[in-house]
Image: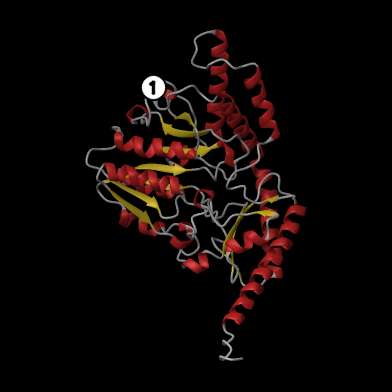
Amino acid sequence: MTTIYLDHNSTTPLDPRVVEAMLPVFRDHYANPSSPHLAGRVVADLVDRARQEVGALVGAPTGAQGYEVVFTSGATESANLALRGVFTGTALTPGRSQVVVGATEHRAVLEAARVAVARSRGVLVQIPARRDGHLDLNRLPRLLAADTALVAVMAANNETGAVTDVRRVSRLAHEAGALVFCDVTQAAGKLDVALSEWGVDLAVASAHKLGGPKGVGALLVRRELLPRLVPLAVGGGQERGLRPGTLNTPGIVGFGCMAALAAAERDAWTRRVGRLTRLLHHLLTDRLEGVYLNGPVRGRLPNTLNLRFAGAPADALLTCVPEVAMSPGAACGSGSGEPSHVLTAMGLDRPTALESMRFSLGSTTSEADVRTAAALVAEGVEHVRGLRASLARWSRVPASPPGL
């Protein structure tokens, strides 16, 4: 069965040009980049080039006054290294133990923040979300306190695509003496990310969300903060002492290659994918009644569309439309049977949230894919609604009297 893949916010297919860039590292440049001999230094140069490419993609210059790029296994590890590393190290001003996070953050950030705060006996406070999915930043000044250590927000939400005004968050947080953490995993390659201009102190990203390989991500941290973080593991001195172990050089080179490609092609990608996302929305709402947008009309990732199909639970719709890869929410929460925490934070009740589906388009999505997917999904919604209506009628039929 041919699958139409509309789940790029979960992961993306590996760009063929990235494969070509990685092959020589598997085949020829296999030396350990930590080795002092010539072969090792050649590979170390490839890693350093990738650092510059990743930093450039998100507006984080890697010079003496800029950021360090620490390669990890992905954004989840990076978030733990940043949030837990801050609290176990000396990056914080003594006496500061409160963390303020967006209510719609990725589970990796929410859980890492929860663990960090619990170990430091601090307090975790959430910035509430508005009905349109944007964080209510008007509430942020009242949430900041004298003991606020760090404010964590994502540049763009992985489920609704809602974009955050990170520059405003940074200004408010720094005025309160707090550090700023930003998850740019979904925004990198899709938006003009500018960590330095925004005033972000720590950020995380992952290669496989933008066409790069799985198993490699990055923590971007201001140079002056680097020696004040504590690693999650101990061993060698790789990655500035923060992430011991032999580097995943092929993955890192692939990350750098994809970062450079994404930076060069972002504007064209945004126009094309944005048009296809709008087309998908139009086709579904044109054919179906009871379709509601979860998330903002404006200020949203160009590739992300989260829709509620009233009367059609997402799990039933997935079963009816196996030809389309779509998602009720983040992949990390699939199979739990619980509604998306992002949608409930926006004010949706449980039944409504469970009727919602996320579509996320990417580089490999064609107009034919969109048109076919829209037709299949619309048929699936109609089928699920019809089944539910039949079951409801059947449940109302009175039982036959005894003896008949």
Residue holding disc 1: 235
**Where is residue 283 shown, x and y percent of the image?**
71, 64
At mark 1, the secondary structure is loop
Q: Nearer the viewer, residue 270 or 24?
A: 24
User: Residue at 67% across / 30% down in the picture?
Assistant: 19
Left/right of residue 353 with respect to residue 236 in the rendered view: right
Which residue in the rendered view is the most extreme toward the front? Answer: 403
* Residue toward you, 395 or 155: 395
Q: Quadrant of residue 65?
A: top left
Relative vertical location of residue 235 with respect to residue 334 in this rendering, above or below:
above
Quadrant containing the C terminus is bottom right
Confirm whether residue 235 shows in the render: yes
Q: Does residue 367 sit above or below 208 in this rendering?
A: below
Residue 178 in sight here: no
Residue depicted at x 59% and y 71%: 311
Q: Is residue 125 above or below residue 38?
A: below
> Residue 256: image x %, image y %?
58, 29
Residue drawn at 26 percent across, 42 percent down: 120
Q: Residue furthest right?
A: 368
Residue sitting farthest toward the top: 37
Outermost residue toward the left in this view? 95
- For label 1, count other residues whose C-alpha is less than 10 Å away and answer few (under 14), some (14-19) or many (20+): few
As drawn, is 368 to the left or to the right of 259? right
**Residue name at image x 61 percent, y 29 percent:** 254
Q: Position of residue 248 (x, y in %)?
A: 54, 25
Picture quadrant where residue 108 is located: top left
Q: Amino acid at mark 1?
A: Gly
Residue 15: % across, % down: 67, 36
* Residue 139 location, quadrant: bottom left
